[in-house]
Amino acid sequence: QDPELRGDGDAADASFAALRDLAEIEQEEIGEDAEADENMVRATAWRNSFYEAHEDNYTIDTTLRLKMRSPVHPNSAGADGGPDLEKQARPPAPKTFGTLFGVYLPCLQNILGVILFLRLPWIVGQAGMLLSTAVVALCVSSTLLTTLSMSALATNGRVSGGGPYGILLSNLGPEFAGSIGVLFYLGTTIAATMYTLGGVEALYTNFLTPETVLFSFDRQIIGIFWSFALGGIVFAGMKYVARVSLVFLVIVLSAVFFMTLGTILFAAGVWNPPGVKAPADLSENLLSNYTINPATGRLPDFTFLLALFYPSVTGIMAGSNRSAVLQSPGRAIPKGTLGAISTTTFIYILTIWLFGLSIANETLLDNKLVAAFIAWPHQYVVAVGIIMSTVGAGLQSLAGAPQLLRSIANDGHIPFLRVFGTKSRDDEPRRAVLLTTALSALACLAGNLDYITPIITMFFLAMYGAINMACFLSGILKSPGFRPTWRYFHWSTALVGFSICFIFMFVISVLYGCVAIILVSAIY
């Protein structure tokens, strides 16, 4: 209320310095007694009145606003137009999720997907069992090293809400967090397109024929309507998507089980599904046998198969998305994510060798949905599971991407994205949902997930590379604010992780790699 603070000069600057000191005091632990709570409300109310008096004359740095956030902030209006102190002073939601349900199962659901059923058997037919195993190993190596870097960030002090973007923002600053966050958003959005096109392909292959053409650009148009249908569900309420996520995970695991059981029974000679042939000998699928892909007219090579499979190992950020409701984020995120990576890698390797030793190369190349045809007791058991899994994964992507975009927009570090923010964290990010749905539907014009997966791969490689580079710089420069307690992190592992991602980007596509780097640099 000092009149001097309403004018220009050193008094206002000194007041800003005092405001910073006040913010640091507010970040300390406040006791449970009523007097401490009353002091907190009084201090934050004074700070908000200061903002209202001076934000027209002074530009307050957004990062400072972020660091000084408390349960009371100007965007929460009460009945009289002022701050709703009672609502904002409520304690945070209880942190009830442990490693299993908070990290492991969400990561498992996001990693396992349509590529396992629709493309991995075909990759085995093209590359052979040895090179297919190498593809999985190389892809997993990048996500494993990135997980070590993310674990270091998750154990670097107290982890709050905000998912991976919040963790990156609090550890690495707005530049790295903003650039990585936008890549994460784009990769997650286009991943929804991949699931949609995968569902359309499974629908055609199982219930029609792969060569069926209902009308011109039929798959593209069906994919667009599919995307808008999923977007409409998300627009109606994201909370419903989260409630059914476990159901879709059970469907995916059931499909994997019946697929594996059918393959074992077929190899044992007690199950003879139609259209599936046995190999002439056990070494038939050992080495590569590259043939032209009829869907694209392109002769695949090792790098193309690497880009095609890579989206099957992404999804490692799903655990950190729930950091706000984890009992111990610093312990649950590393253990749960590494456990999910180990489980899915085992499933991929087992599938490669089971299919390679049991099914003829001709069948693997000609029937991209052989994973459903060989399932016991009937192909529809896995076929319906695949379609339902694409619906669930698509909903998860279309629900997660707008939340991330809303977080970036609310922080204000990228000005042109502020329109997609919300006044309150409890509000649904409906404008972000509309943008995400539109981008996902637009990408359906590709018509085939073989065209989509290299783009998704490039976004995730750039994102993972940026995370590893940030951790490498923080570790090698011994940043005072970077003191992770995760014992298995070293700056050298982050450097190797960055190198693998960087090399993969340019081995897969020099053009896409350059575009990704320019995008990251421009946002940074």
Image (tube, helix red, strand yellow):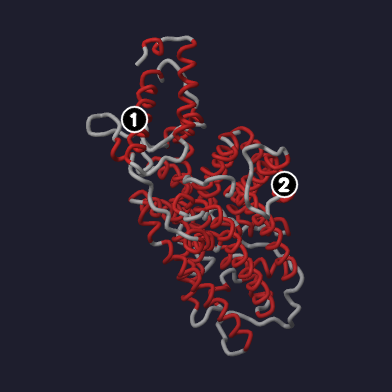
On screen, residue 28 versus residue 370, left or right, reads left
The residue labelled by disc 2 is: 491
Residue 315 in sight from this viewpoint: no
- Residue 363 image position (x, y, % from top left): 64, 75
- The foreground one among 386 and 56 is 56
* Quarter of the rendering containing residue 362: bottom right
The residue labelled by disc 1 is: 42
Query: Circle 1: is it few (<14), some (14-19), or many (20+) Cα within 10 Å?
Result: few
Residue drawn at x 53%, y 55% is 194
- What amino acid is at disc 2? Trp
Say which label, 2 or 1, has the lower sequence index: 1
- The N terminus - image quarter: top left
- What amino acid is at disc 1? Arg
- Residue 144 image position (x, y, % from top left): 66, 57
Residue drawn at x 40%, y 17% is 56
- The foreground one among 202 and 401 is 401
Residue drawn at x 45%, y 24% is 19
**Disc 2, SS:** helix
Q: Nearer the viewer, mark 2 or mark 1?
A: 1
- Residue 7 image position (x, y, % from top left): 41, 10
Residue 182 position (above or below residue 48): below
